[in-house]
Structure formats: C-alpha cells, structure tokens
Image: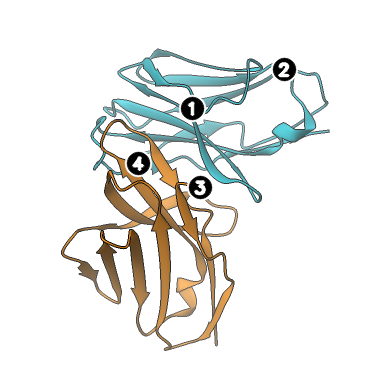
C-alpha cells in the first residue's frame, strides 16, 4: 500500500502567488483531512471531507484558502494569494470512515515557505 | 482555552528510564482519545488509542481519567528510538473533529 501521497514535498514561493497542494488518499478510504502544522499553533485541522463532500471547513483561516475533492482519489488545497504567515507544513490524512474511532493515516506533508 | 493542552517539554531521559506524559482536555463530551508519535520532519503516526479501562502495548501504557479530564502515556525502559514528539489527540463524538495537542518532546540519551 502506497499510503497517503502528497505533492509537492517542498514549495517555495513569493508572497501573492497562488499555491496548490495535492493529495491522494489511501485507496478505499472515505474521509480526507487537511491539516496545517506550525511551531506556534501545533497541528490544526483546516477542512475534512466524507465521501468527497466537505463536511467542516471551519478551520480554514480565510477566503484565501480553498479545498476541493473532485473524486475519491484526489484532493487539492489552494492558497490564493499566498502570504508569509501561510508558511507551514501542510498534511493530508485519510481514514477508512467518518467514525471517530478510525485511525487517521497522514501523508508526508508539504513544507511551504512563502517569502 | 485550548481544547487539548500538553507540557511541551522537552523531556531528556537516560536509556532505560521510565517517563510519563500527561495531557488535559477541556470538553467533557470528548469520546475518543489517542496518542500519536511524530519524528522530526515526519508525519504523525498513531501510537495507540486510549481506552477507558487503560491499555498497554509492550512498554507503553495509556490511561484515561474522565473525572479529571486527562490522559497519560507511560513509557517504560525507554530506548533511543523512542526519541520523538508525542501528540495527544482528542475527538468529540459529534463529528470528525480531531483536536491535537502541540506535542511533548522526548529525547532519550545514551
């Protein structure tokens, strides 16, 4: 099993540019989560999907952030325009179902630096 | 107030020592509890779930105290490979909202 796949692994961009992060969940998993991790705030849930439908996006910081899941095997997180304070590691995770007891499997993360 | 709070450490312990971490949570309706481990510049990985009766996995023991709203992780006979950040995770039963603590850093010294 390939696990959760994220791309790119590293992204360096300039303020104002659009950034798109990609995620392929584990095949057969129904729930997908996007997190952001910084030293100051730790790991924060941005949004999650069940069966490709966004369920809770209350963690999305502002309108500059958007996420889509067009099918069961692909999701994107877009930041437009990017700002230096968006610099963080962005993780995608998937789980087998929406049940709270199901384990989340994390991808390797995308390390984003906005200059 | 944060949903989950942990002592960030760092904890520096010699090999073979026993070390314990605590984590407190604010919402009494929390239903599921976990410990995740995160190595430097890696993704978090599930270490163990925490059950009401307490549970053990080899050298690791997790406990839940609902009355005081905290969970704990005990590591016995610590190994160099245990060096990592340990994240406490709490989930309400009303949705799929996982709340992560900021993590406790452990370094096991030879």
- How many labels, in total? 4
User: Does dot 3 land on a helix, a strand or a loop?
Assistant: loop
B103 in relation to A55, above or below: below
Q: Residue furthest left?
A: B53
Between A70 and A39, which is closer to the camera in this rendering?
A: A39
Q: Position of residue A23 (x, y in %)?
A: 49, 27
**In the displayed image of the protein, which residue is found farthest to the top?**
A70
Real-space Cα separation, disc 2 to disc 4, in angstroms: 28 Å
The colour scheme applied to this rendered structure is by chain
Q: What residue do we see at 74% from left, 34% from top?
A: A85
Q: Residue at x 37, y 85 (%)?
A: B77
Mark carried by residue A104: 4
The secondary element bearing badge 2 is classed as loop
Say which mark, if any, is on residue B61. Answer: none
Q: Quadrant of residue A98?
A: top left
Can the viewer see residue A62 in this picture?
Answer: yes
Q: Do pointers 4 and 3 mark residues of a single chain?
A: no
- First in residue order: circle 2 vs circle 4: 2
Horizontal placement of B32 versus B24: left or right? left
Chain drawn orange in the picture = B
Disc on res. B2: 3
Q: Mark 2 = which residue?
A: A18
First of labels 4, 1 by sequence position: 1
Q: CA distance from mark 4 to mark 1?
A: 14 Å
At mark 4, the secondary structure is: loop
């Amino acid at each position: 099993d390939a696990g959760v796949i994220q791309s790119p692994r590293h992204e360096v961009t300039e303020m104002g540019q659009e950034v798109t992060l990609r995620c392929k969940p584990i095949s057969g998993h129904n729930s997908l989560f996007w997190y952001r991790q910084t030293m100051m705030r730790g790991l924060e849930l941005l949004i999650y999907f069940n069966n490709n439908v966004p369920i809770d996006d209350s963690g999305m910081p502002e309108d500059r952030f958007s996420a889509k899941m067009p099918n069961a095997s692909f999701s994107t997180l877009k930041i437009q325009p990017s700002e230096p304070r968006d610099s963080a590691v962005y993780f995608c995770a998937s789980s087998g179902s929406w049940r709270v007891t199901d384990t989340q499997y994390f991808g390797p993360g995308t390390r984003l630096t906005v200059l | 107030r944060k949903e989950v709070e942990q002592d960030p450490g760092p904890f520096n312990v010699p090999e073979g020592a026993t070390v314990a971490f605590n984590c407190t949570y604010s919402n009494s309706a929390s239903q599921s509890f976990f410990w995740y481990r995160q190595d430097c510049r890696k993704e978090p990985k599930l270490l163990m779930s925490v059950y009401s009766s307490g549970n053990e996995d080899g050298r690791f023991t997790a406990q839940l105290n609902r009355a005081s709203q905290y969970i704990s992780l005990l590591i016995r006979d610590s190994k160099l490979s245990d060096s990592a950040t340990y994240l406490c995770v709490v989930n309400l039963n009303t949705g799929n909202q996982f709340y992560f603590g900021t993590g406790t850093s452990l370094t096991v010294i030879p």
